[in-house]
């Protein structure tokens, strides 16, 4: 599907030659032909280019970037850690916050706390991440900077320029830059999860075994931790795994708004400059990450839930 | 059975009657709030051309760049913000004065808005000069402005004259200290040939023009000519002088004709409109008003397409079962697990970024959740006796699917339709913020994109950034509220809680 969208449609339907974006229009004709040959654009799209594309995917080769003429793999590897840190920590925080608040409100059903939490989670659910990002940028980064001249939070980027080589300072600076994007994604992400986990826990608390535990006189904390938490874990893990595609497609927006030096920004720039190999590689990686996360979730559930293991 | 009866029957199956539903709805604050906001938005969208004061895309420079909203002038410290001062000076608005030795040769003709001046020479006159001075007085009572513009359409034709030269200049005089600033001068040299700057080719005197600053003897980096000239609250005079120098050659006969169309003088304000202006002086309020249209169209259209797709896939998959079901569900699951945003951007790059393109892609990538839910419903619905009854009476598959089963799911469809609108609105706005919006449609996202890219944040232009954000949130929130209350009322599982 990626291949069709990227290579076949522009060339055959729209009549755009991909080499147009790659070669200087004023280059002499023989040089144009040479460049086309280097990037393999002179061969027919099907089957030659397609077969090569699929074969290369299995070998982990994604070709060379049209812009920098560097192997795409190198460029991706350079940015991957940043993206993994940002999205990994945001998924983790969402999960922890959502689970703890969800379980807490489940025990306080119908109280004031419950309705406040529900309303804030609705708010968080409709708030898109770019809007939260812009709001945070406005109030925490630009406003103190413009009015008082205080650099409370950075405006963009992953690291500050001209840092001393001291690793401690570097890590602190990195965390400082991480704060705003992470805040934005947690604020916009926790709501849906809190709501879902709360409903899960409530359904679970209506089960008979919870009634039994209560009848035994177990304290509520112990019931929640020992019984309810254990039983809601499988759907929780599934929901976290299912949220991966959303986070993966959220890369683009978050990283572009905060100029975070990661794959999202990379794919945004690559798409805008018709840098096919880069786009293909990142989209392929996203598909792989999604599949892998679902697979891991399956394995995790089979370990957590004895009923699944027995089958 | 009329459609009304059928509706009543369906509601009755959910344990509700129509009046009861309405009562249940009206008792909720969320519902009332949502409906009020939504209706307000719909009204604004419908009457956008009436409410908006300017065209949102093409009308720029209606005031100075980054002008604040006009109502901030009620606050202390901001009363003095420059307001718009746009004047059109027609021929009869000028006070005229003619002097010089040959003043009698000047003839003024001011029928209509254009002013025409003739200098007629019969050939026997001796040397001398004639001068026409036009003056226009106006008061300026605000803080020094950042910009001023004079647009001067003027044309001069010289017929059959050798020894006659002319010169004209524009000046602005501050009357409190009688200081005169020459802002335009055709000298040097004294001219003797035709000069045509009429119509769109008119002379533009702009305070940000470095030539003007040089003429006034300042550097544009150090001092703003507009602030320098209009430094105090007092009366000012625009003066326009046409001088004619006659060498007095005997037998040299002919005329000089000066035509001047109405002159525009503008001081664009730093406080303008309900919500101020953006980086190119376009009215933000109008952009917001038209943005309501875009958001509602995108939200409602793509949600309805998505619902139709969801119904088709969900009902067919649930009713038919077997390989059809598996194929449809495979497609649905694949799409659910695909990161949608890169796909949307890719498709838009390949097929263009028109507003209808955005709507269709959003719809094509958002029907999956509904299809899954519907399939589960239909699986249980199709075993019910009434379906069997229709089948026994000889109803075809299509009839059963879309006339018998699908109407049963109307409550689910209603609230999932409403609940998928905000997502579409927000995604469209997000795409526009990234710069992938339709450039010819003034959406709220586009306003934010411009604020993000053209210094709205660096200059803390809150009137530029906050209103589109607030509008988006308010609209999305109201629709979510409506959807949630509908869900609570129509979904028996939630209602019982």
Image: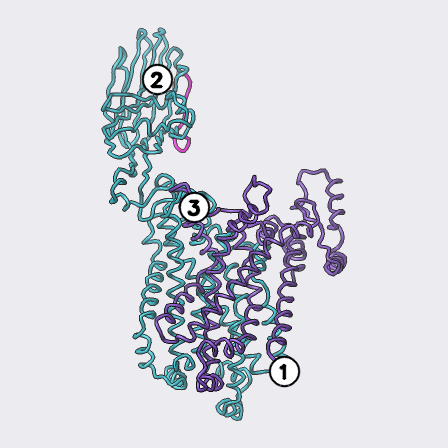
Question: x and y percent of residue B187 in the render?
Answer: 39, 17
Q: Colour of chain B?
A: cyan
Compared to B119, does B325 lie above or below? below
Q: Which residue is found at the position 25% from the left and 18% from the top?
A: B98
State which mark lies toward you, 2 or 1.
1
Q: Chain A is drawn in which colour?
A: purple
Question: x and y percent of residue B483 in the render?
Answer: 40, 71
Q: Which mark is residue B322?
A: 1
Residue at disc 2, secondary structure: strand
State which mark lies toward you, 3 or 2.
3
Of residues B372 and B257, the one drawn nearer to the viewer in this rendering: B372
Which label's residue is closer to the chain start, 2 or 1? 2
Compared to A192, does B109 lie above or below? above
Q: Would you identify the image quadrant in which residue B43 lies? A: bottom left
Question: Can the viewer see residue B194?
Answer: yes
Q: Would residue B274 appear left or right of B403 to someone viewing this image?
A: left
Dividing the image into 4 quarters, which one contains the C terminus of chain B?
A: bottom left
Q: Distance between the residues labelled 1 and 3?
A: 58 Å
Label 1–label 3 contact, CB within 8 A: no
Of residues B441 and A72, the one drawn nearer to the viewer in this rendering: A72
Residue identifier under label 2: B255
Query: Which chain is home to disc 2?
Result: B
Query: Which chain is home to disc 3?
Result: A
Q: Give the range drawn in magenta.
A: B192-201
Q: Which residue is found at the position 39% from the left and 30% from the top?
A: B204
Residue identifier under label 3: A142
Compared to B205, does B247 lie above or below? above
Crowdedness near tag 2: few (<14), some (14–19) or many (≥20) residues, C-alpha within 10 Å: some
């Amino acid at each position: 599907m990626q291949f069709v969208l990227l290579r076949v449609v522009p060339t055959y339907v729209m009549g755009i030659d991909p080499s147009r974006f790659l070669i200087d229009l004023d280059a002499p004709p023989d040089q144009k032909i040479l460049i086309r040959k280097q990037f393999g654009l002179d061969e027919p799209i099907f089957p030659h280019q397609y077969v090569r594309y699929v074969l290369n995917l299995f070998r982990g080769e994604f070709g060379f970037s049209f812009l920098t003429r560097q192997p795409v793999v190198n460029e991706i590897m350079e940015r991957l850690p940043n993206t993994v840190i940002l999205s990994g920590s945001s998924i983790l925080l969402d999960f922890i916050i959502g689970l703890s608040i969800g379980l807490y409100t489940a025990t306080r059903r119908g109280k004031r706390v419950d309705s406040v939490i529900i309303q804030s989670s609705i708010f968080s659910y409709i708030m898109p991440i770019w809007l939260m990002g812009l709001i945070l940028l406005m109030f925490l980064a630009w406003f103190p900077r413009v009015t008082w001249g205080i650099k409370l939070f950075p405006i963009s980027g992953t690291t500050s320029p001209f840092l001393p080589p001291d690793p401690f300072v570097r890590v602190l600076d990195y965390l400082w830059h991480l704060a705003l994007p992470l805040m934005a994604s947690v604020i916009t992400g926790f709501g849906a999860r809190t709501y879902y986990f709360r409903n899960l826990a409530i359904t679970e608390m209506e089960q008979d075994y919870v009634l039994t535990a209560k009848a035994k006189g177990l304290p509520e904390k112990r019931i929640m931790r020992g019984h309810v938490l254990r039983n809601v874990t499988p759907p929780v893990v599934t929901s976290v795994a299912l949220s991966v595609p959303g986070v993966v497609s959220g890369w683009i927006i978050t990283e572009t708004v905060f100029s975070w030096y990661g794959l999202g920004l990379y794919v945004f720039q690559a798409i805008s400059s018709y840098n096919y190999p880069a786009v293909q590689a990142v989209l392929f990686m996203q598909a792989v990450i999604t599949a892998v996360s679902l697979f891991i979730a399956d394995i995790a559930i089979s370990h957590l839930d004895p009923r699944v293991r027995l089958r | 059975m009329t459609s009304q009866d059928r509706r009543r029957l369906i509601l009755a199956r959910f344990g509700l009657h129509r009046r009861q539903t309405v009562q249940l709805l009206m008792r909720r604050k969320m519902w009332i709030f949502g409906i009020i906001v939504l209706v307000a938005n719909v009204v604004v969208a419908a009457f956008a051309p009436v409410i908006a004061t300017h065209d949102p895309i093409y009308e720029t420079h209606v005031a100075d760049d980054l002008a604040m909203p006009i109502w901030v002038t009620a606050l202390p410290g901001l009363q003095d913000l420059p307001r718009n001062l746009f004047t059109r000076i027609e021929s009869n608005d000028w006070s005229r004065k003619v002097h010089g030795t040959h003043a009698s040769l000047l003839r003024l003709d001011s029928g209509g808005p254009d002013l025409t001046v003739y200098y007629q020479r019969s050939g026997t006159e001796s040397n001398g000069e004639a001068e026409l001075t036009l003056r226009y007085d106006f008061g300026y009572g605000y803080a020094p402005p950042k910009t001023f513009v004079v647009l001067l359409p003027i044309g001069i034709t010289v017929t059959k004259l050798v020894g006659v030269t002319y010169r004209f200049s524009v000046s602005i005089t501050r009357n409190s200290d009688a200081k005169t600033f020459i802002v335009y001068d055709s000298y040097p040299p004294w001219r003797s040939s035709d000069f045509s700057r009429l119509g769109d080719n008119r002379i533009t005197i702009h305070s940000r023009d470095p030539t003007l600053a040089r003429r006034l003897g300042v550097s544009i980096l150090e001092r703003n000519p507009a602030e320098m000239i209009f430094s105090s609250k007092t009366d000012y005079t625009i003066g326009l002088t046409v001088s004619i120098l006659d060498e007095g050659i005997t037998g040299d006969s002919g005329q000089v004709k000066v035509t001047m169309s109405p002159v525009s003088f503008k001081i664009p304000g730093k406080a303008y409109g309900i919500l101020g202006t953006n980086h190119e002086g376009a009215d933000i309020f109008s952009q917001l008003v038209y943005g309501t249209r875009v958001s509602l169209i995108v939200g409602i259209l793509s949600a309805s397409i998505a619902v139709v797709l969801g119904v088709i896939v969900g009902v067919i998959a649930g009713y038919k079962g077997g390989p059809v079901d598996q194929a449809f569900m495979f497609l649905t699951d694949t799409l659910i697990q695909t990161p949608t945003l890169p796909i949307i951007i890719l498709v838009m790059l390949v097929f263009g970024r028109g507003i209808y393109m955005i709507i269709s892609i959003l719809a094509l990538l958002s029907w999956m959740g509904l299809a899954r839910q519907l399939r589960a419903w239909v699986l249980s619905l199709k075993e019910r006796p009434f379906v069997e009854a229709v089948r026994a009476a000889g109803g075809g598959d299509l009839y059963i699917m879309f006339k018998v089963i699908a109407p049963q799911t109307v409550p689910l469809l209603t609230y999932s339709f409403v609940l998928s609108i905000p997502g579409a609105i927000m995604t469209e706005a997000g795409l526009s913020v990234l710069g992938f919006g339709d450039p010819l449609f003034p959406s709220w996202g586009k306003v934010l994109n411009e604020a993000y890219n053209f210094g709205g944040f660096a200059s803390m232009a809150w009137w530029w950034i906050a209103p589109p954000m607030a509008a988006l949130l308010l609209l999305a929130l109201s629709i979510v509220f409506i959807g949630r209350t509908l869900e609570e009322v129509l979904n028996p599982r939630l209602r019982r809680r």
